[in-house]
Amino acid sequence: MNISKRVQALSTSPIRRLVPYATVAKAKGKKVYHLNIGQPDIETPMQFMESIRKFDEKVISYGNSQGEMVLIEAVKKYYKEWNMHFDNTNIYVTNGGSEALTLAIMTLCDPGDEVLVFEPYYANYKTFANTYNVNINAVATTAENGYRLPSETEIEKKITPRTKAILITNPGNPTGVVFTEEEMQMISRLVLKYDLGLIADEVYREFVYDGAYKSFGHMPELEQNLVIVDSVSKRYSACGARIGCLLSHNDAFCKELMKCCQARLCCPTLEQVGAAALYTTPKTYLDAVNKEYKKRRDTIASALAKVPDVLASNPSGAFYVMVKLPVDDAEKFAIWLLEEFDVDGETVMFAPGNGFYDTEGRGVDEARLAYVLKSEDLEKAIAILAAGLKAYPGKK
Amino acid sequence: MNISKRVQALSTSPIRRLVPYATVAKAKGKKVYHLNIGQPDIETPMQFMESIRKFDEKVISYGNSQGEMVLIEAVKKYYKEWNMHFDNTNIYVTNGGSEALTLAIMTLCDPGDEVLVFEPYYANYKTFANTYNVNINAVATTAENGYRLPSETEIEKKITPRTKAILITNPGNPTGVVFTEEEMQMISRLVLKYDLGLIADEVYREFVYDGAYKSFGHMPELEQNLVIVDSVSKRYSACGARIGCLLSHNDAFCKELMKCCQARLCCPTLEQVGAAALYTTPKTYLDAVNKEYKKRRDTIASALAKVPDVLASNPSGAFYVMVKLPVDDAEKFAIWLLEEFDVDGETVMFAPGNGFYDTEGRGVDEARLAYVLKSEDLEKAIAILAAGLKAYPGKK
């Protein structure tokens, strides 16, 4: 039988494709520090399981296609506290941020259309776009320039008649970079000039360590062009709940989106009950988590600063840092660390950087490190990485 | 901003689009018997909530992209009892049967390709295909012929070079028809002759009332072409759990499928824990449910037989019956029943038939009735329908 070209052309996830090597390493008794995946070790607030345990409907029946009203109300309230105002009809519950992204792309783009992204970017953006035969149009940022946006002229050059949306992550994954006011203004101008959709993936909104966060939802001029992607996964350390949402003030977008939501019937009932309860978690929880990650950010930043020949991004948000390593090929280095290297039976795993780039050949000597471990483990992990760099035969 | 043509062209769900009329009717104090949606009223087995309540991981973390192993093992065991043998690597957990269908279509078809279906068919098949720019190629079956398949020659005429898969529901939704051995052999011959994918949606497998059920998984010649779509939704009355799966022995298919599963990370953890527990429900549960639905089938079939000028399918499986009504337009009739008609403050709601047809103009005087209510309620509902037919101004 036929296998589609679209699926054959997809890449495997750079975050997950080295997992088999880690499995072998662990089977041999090696301890692996996982810096490859953004899986927080923070406890999920107890409100999640408590609310679910209390659920006592006799039939686990289909829910509302738009989402359970208790969750939509909770999201609305959360946004109101962030001084962003959405009505119930502007909020659509999704199967994680992942489905929010796929729904946004399919609703804005036809086959052959393009979504403009800034590379390096979250690798699954490309998979999501390509499964709908939508192309990624990548604007380069560089390690040397701290992964900051290029000039407005440079970006504008990349916009074509097929460009239908700009997709950004802020704070950034994999770079941890948070946009400046100037960068946001520049994006806003381009979005309005070309009447593009702006898909703003802001799932790391609560993870900003240097100053206040400004959302694209705080720019009223973008109201009709903005689609916000959100999720409880990172915010409340509930990645396995797979509950996200899409928010938009554009009525035409919402109307079309609803047809797609209806087709897949609804999101899971219990996880929505749990997610709604997560939004009742006291603000002190988010503050404490932010403080913990700030500590980890400081730990990994200062540990990396001591490793010779490593160029690291300056992460002021999310929980990733992008590094340029003095190696021939970061993917080979990652495999070598898992297969052939250890310090007292311990090694480290990261996501190779090339998978976060669209442009062939870029990111080969880069890596994404997720600082989702306790500070003492992070220090150990970076020390192992440094020792590995010294011993690695493919060092540049 | 641009809204994609693909999404603008989608129809709204025939099962859900009349909901606003029902909401108004209920607000006015009318009782509505819901025959429009396949939402069983059977209690979900207690194993579901019991297993979830016991879940005590501190972090609700990302799961395996393929699915939680406890659920994959449970599905494997269930299939073994049905004398179908799958390895763990042949089973992929999905967000309901819905995601299983979208994953199957995107993995088998590129834009412009066709999926062959027999109309009337489950309306969301078209939505799922069209969001991937895959076309539906519908082969007609008729109320007069009891919605049985046409001849092999008739079907073969519809197969084009762009036809990449046949998508069937067995037992059928919306007709309740179960394929005969001859029909299955005919489909099998065509699938093999043209090396098509066969997407077999068998979520109603346990709901067969006249004789034993044969799965396409029982035909070894189809091994490399068969993709089974399954779900716990109907089987265990757990529609809101949104847990389904895809099964295939075709390694190339599984390999490509896995890339798509990895992109959306994983299915929800708790619902998978619950679903795995559902598969430990004693066989007596499924037997009792089958017996209850057989009773309801008998009730609705004999009630419909008494209504003049109504031509009903002979449902030997699932919990739907497709009826041809003596009206100008079944959708208008459905709205009229909700807005203008009642018997002692009660009315009935069904899904208009046109939404289950691809061919313009077909199914206008047909309706799908889901017999998911207790027998006494079904009798009342059909009596109201009969009274409505008598009073309806648009009667043919």
Image: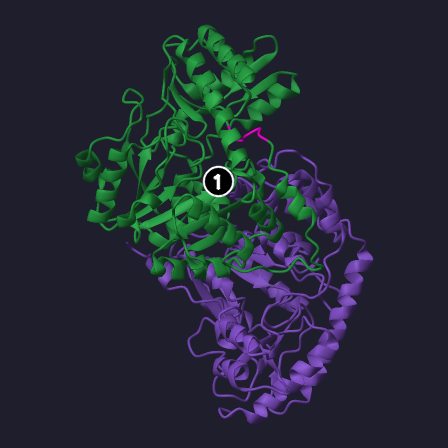
Chain colours: A purple, B green
Q: Is residue B41 magenta?
A: yes
Up/down of A165 relative to B168, above or below? below
Q: Residue at x 65, y 47 (%)?
A: B51
- State the predominant SS element of the stretch in magenta: loop
Up/down of B316 relative to A284, above or below? above
Q: Residues within 10 Å of mark 1 (few under 14, many from 20)?
A: many
Q: Residue at x 52, y 30 (%)?
A: B289
Place of residue A19 in the rendered image (x, y in percent of width and height, measured from the top left): 52, 71
Q: Nearer the viewer, residue B344 or B304?
A: B304
Q: Does the rendering let one see residue A186?
A: yes
Q: Residue at x 47, y 34 (%)?
A: B13
Q: Secondary structure at mark 1?
A: helix
Up/down of B393 relative to A94, above or below? above
Place of residue A107 in the rendered image (x, y in percent of width and height, measured from the top left): 48, 48
Please state which amino acid type lies under the numbered disc 1.
Ala
Place of residue A144 in the rendered image (x, y in percent of width and height, measured from the top left): 57, 83
Which residue is most to the left?
Answer: B153
Along the horizontal axis of the image, is A34 left or right of B159? right
Q: Residue at x 53, y 42 (%)?
A: A261
Residue segment shown in magenta = B37-42
Residue denoted by label 1: A263
Place of residue A244 in the rendered image (x, y in percent of width and height, measured from the top left): 61, 52
